[in-house]
Amino acid sequence: MTASVFDHPILSGLLGDDEIGAQFSAAAELSAMLRFEVALAEAEAAEGLIPGVSAEDIAALPEAFVADLDALKQAIGRDGVVIPELVRQWRTGLGDAGKHLHFGATSQDAIDTGLMLRLVAVLSIFDQRLAAVISALEGLEKRFGTQSLMGRTRMQAAIAITVADRLTTWKAPVIAHRLAVQNLLKKGLPLQFGGAAGTLEKLEDKAAFVRARLATLLQLSDRPQWHSQRAAIAEIGGLFSQISGSLGKIGQDLALMADNGTAVIGGGGASSAMPHKRNPVKAEVLVTLARFSAVQISGLHQALVHEQERSGAAWTLEWMILPQMAFATGAATRLATEVLQSIEDLGDR
C-alpha cells in the first residue's frame, strides 16, 4: 500500500517511471551514501589523515555490506536521520578500520552527496529522453509540417499558420531544457562536505585538499559550505518543473487539437461507457504532471529557509518533494515521447 501515485501498484501504470524510481529506491540510496564514505576514506588516506590500510578495508565494504532495514527504520524515527545507525552498521565487522570510517563528516554530507550522485543518473536519463522528444517532434515536422493549421489566440481562431509553426513552439523549449541539463552535468552537481557545522574543523589545514580530492573521486563539483544554502536543490527542482511545464504545454495543445479534429492520436484512451471514444489520456496526463510540479516548486522555495547552520524541518521537506518531482518529470518525458510517436495526423482537414 502506498499513498504515492508514482509507485502505486495500479496508478503507476500511468504515472510511474521504473527507471527514475530505481534511483530513489532504498538500495540506490544506501549504495550512493556508501560510495561517499568509500571515496572519503580514500581522499583522507591520500592526505595522511587515516591509515591507507583502513581506506582499503572500507573500500571492500560495498561487496559485503547488507543493511538491516528494520533497524534503520526504527533509528530514523528516533534520530531524524539514517546515518548514525548506518555508520554503526557499516563499522560492524570493520574492526580497527571502523573508527576511521566517516571521519570528519556528518550525516548531511553523506545524505546530500548521496542524493547528488543519484541525481546525476536522473539528469542523464532526462538528457536521453529529451533527445527522444526532440527527435519525435522533428519526425512530425517532416510528416506534417507543411500542412495548414488555424492559429488560435485565447482559444479563438486567429490566422492561418502551418503545423511546423506550432511544432517550433513545442520544440524550442525542449531543446533549451536539454541544454540546461547538459550544462548542469558538465558543471557538475555539488559535493556536500562540511562536517558538523560546515567548517570541516576535524580536518584542520587538510580540509580543502580532502574536499577537492573527494569531489574529483565522485565526479562532483567542489563547492564549499552549501549545507544551509539550498539554491542547488531549488535549481534542480526548478529545471524539473520547467521540463514538465513545457511538455504539459504540448499535452494541452494536443488535447485541444484532438477535440477540434486537428490531431489524430492513436493508441488507447477507451471509455467504459462510450466505445467509440479515444480519449487523449497521455496528453492530458502531461498537463497534470506539469501542474503537479508547479505546485511542488513552491515547497522547495519554502525549504530555502534553512535556519542557521542546519535545518531539520526544511531538510526533511526536501526529502518529501524533490523525489516526487523527479518521478513526475520522468513520467512526463516518457509519456511525451509515447504520445508524439502515436500521432497519426496533424493539421486542418
Image: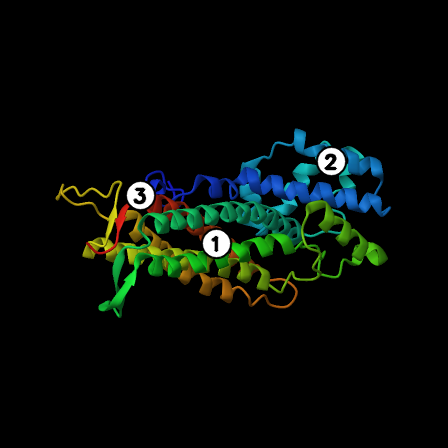
Q: Is residue 301 above or below residue 13?
A: below
Q: Which mark is residue 49?
A: none
**Image quadrant for the C terminus?**
bottom left
Q: Which residue is mark 3?
A: 342
Q: Which residue is mark 2?
A: 59
Q: Amino acid at mark 2?
A: Ala
Mark 3 or mark 1: whose residue is earlier in sequence: 1
On screen, residue 30 versus residue 52, left or right, reads: left
Mark 3–mark 1 distance (CA, rounded to whole Å): 34 Å
Q: Residue at x 74, y 33 (%)?
A: 94
Between 184 and 189, which is closer to the camera in this rendering? 184
The residue tagged with tag 3: helix, strand or loop?
A: loop
Could you say where residue 292 lies in the image, as x and y percent from the top left?
38, 57
Q: Secondary structure at mark 2?
A: helix
Q: Position of residue 63 (x, y in %)?
A: 66, 30
The quadrant the N terminus occupies is: top left
> Badge 1: how crowded within 10 Å, few (<14), some, or many (20+)?
few
Q: Position of residue 32 (x, y in %)?
A: 62, 42
Looking at this view, is 307 or 157 the one in front? Answer: 157
